[in-house]
Image (spheres, grey):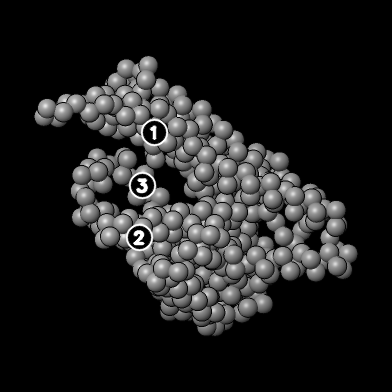
Amino acid sequence: MLTTLRNALTVPDIRKRIGFVFFAFAVFVFMIHVQLPNVDQAQWNRLIANGAFYQFLGFLSGGALQKLSIIAMGITPYINASIIMQLMTVVIPQLEEMAKKGGEEGRKTISRYTRYLTIVLGTIQATSMAIAMSRGGVFFDHSWQFIVYAVVAFVSGTMFLMWLGEQITDKGIGNGISLIIFVGIVLRFPTQVGQTFSLANKGGVNWLGLLLWVGIALVTIVSIVFMYQGQRRIPVQQARRVIGRKMYAGRSSYIPLRLNNAGVISIIFAISILLLPQQALSWFGTSGKTTGVASNISFFMTTYFGPNSFLYNATYFLLVVVFTFFYSAIVVNTKDIADNLKKSGSFIPGIRPGQPTVDYINKILIRITTAAAIYLGLLAVLPSLQRDVGVSGLYIGSTSLLIVVGVALDSITQIEARLAMRDYRGFINK
């Protein structure tokens, strides 16, 4: 990896792209400190400390939510819109046709629909947040005009981050949206690590537990790398072809099926659904108080369905497993793979083309997805185990580790691809 980075910095074009990425990171950090006016920061700190949904959004926004910046919602509405559009592409035939046969124009149309959906989802989320903050006494100005102003500011901040991510993709090294989430998570790591070791020096953290946490973190990172880069390679044989008077011998290749096709999406889906009831309760409460049915639901949620409870973690595990299977089935279209093999005159040795090929690939996909789903489910509930070892200042965030490691590996792959492209161009020019 270090060799790849060193080689990349010697190429002017790639060095310029990497420099643009760090410039975009600096813009992102600057936007974190552009705060919304008329905010009671002390009251907001008390409110966010008791809201798991806000803490989830906070770790994705790089601390912008804690400062109540105009980019407090982060890029979350765009992520949700992208996921919904992916699901709709499978469900709606017109969108599926546009994605497969529309070419560049079709992809641009789907991207435009995604932006429109981002505005809709961002407006809904910003409105609910602004109303909840106004009822919770976070704003000094409780007029509807200021609530509208806050909604417009939050949505504009999200759209700016979406534009910044697209610029990173075009002028940087790709994966713009992922890199924005990546830097938002990484920005909070030094503070959390510093707080943990500060507590350890003061005797607030068990040093044995801290060492155990470090060991768990290292094992987790290694397992994420293995799961992220792991593949199940299905051998493929290409039949002999006769072109003109020449006969070309068949070639052997393979179909690479990733172990983790769902990535971090299944965990984000699961935690969003788990935290949605708590967010809904905050909409109906006034100054942190609830009455009637909302009070009973709040009591049940805090007593039996807290983040450290067995019921919460069991539900979390099951949701991650279910969404992993669901998303993998959407991402990997086994029927298309079989059709493409048949059209190109290729086949899997020992398997007949057509439906038997589909059944064979489905059987393999179910096996590797089962392993990935169980792994992601255990990774999701790992923070509860980490809290039990006595380290309360720094948690092993399964989602954050998965995003950081995955984006880092993707970025290195992008740089290696650009280096290889430069070598090919140089060879052709010579």
Q: Judge the density around disc 2: few (<14), some (14-19), many (≥20) Cα neighbours within 10 Å.
A: some
Residue 67 picture location, percent across and down: 59, 75
Q: Secondary structure at mark 2?
A: helix
Q: Residue at x 80, y 69 (%)?
A: 198
Front of the two marks 3 and 1: 1
Front of the two marks 2 and 1: 2
Badge 3 amino acid:
Gln
Instruction: State the quadrant of the N terminus.
Output: bottom right
Q: Which residue is mark 3?
A: 86
Q: Secondary structure at mark 1?
A: strand
Whole-angstrom CA distance, mark 3 to mark 1, is 23 Å
In the drawing, does residue 275 fall left or right of residue 103? Answer: right
Q: In terms of image quadrants, where is residue 233?
A: top left
Badge 1 amino acid:
Ile
Q: In terms of image quadrants, where is residue 427?
A: bottom left
Q: Which residue is mark 1?
A: 255
First reached walking from the N terminus: tag 3 or tag 1? 3
Whole-angstrom CA distance, mark 2 to mark 1, is 27 Å
Residue 95 picture location, percent across and down: 25, 46
In the drawing, does residue 114 fall left or right of residue 221? Answer: left
Viewer-side residue, 193 vs 135: 193
Badge 2 amino acid:
Arg
Q: Which mark is residue 318?
A: none
Q: Is residue 368 depicted above or below 120 in this figure? A: above
Q: Residue at x 70, y 56 (%)?
A: 395
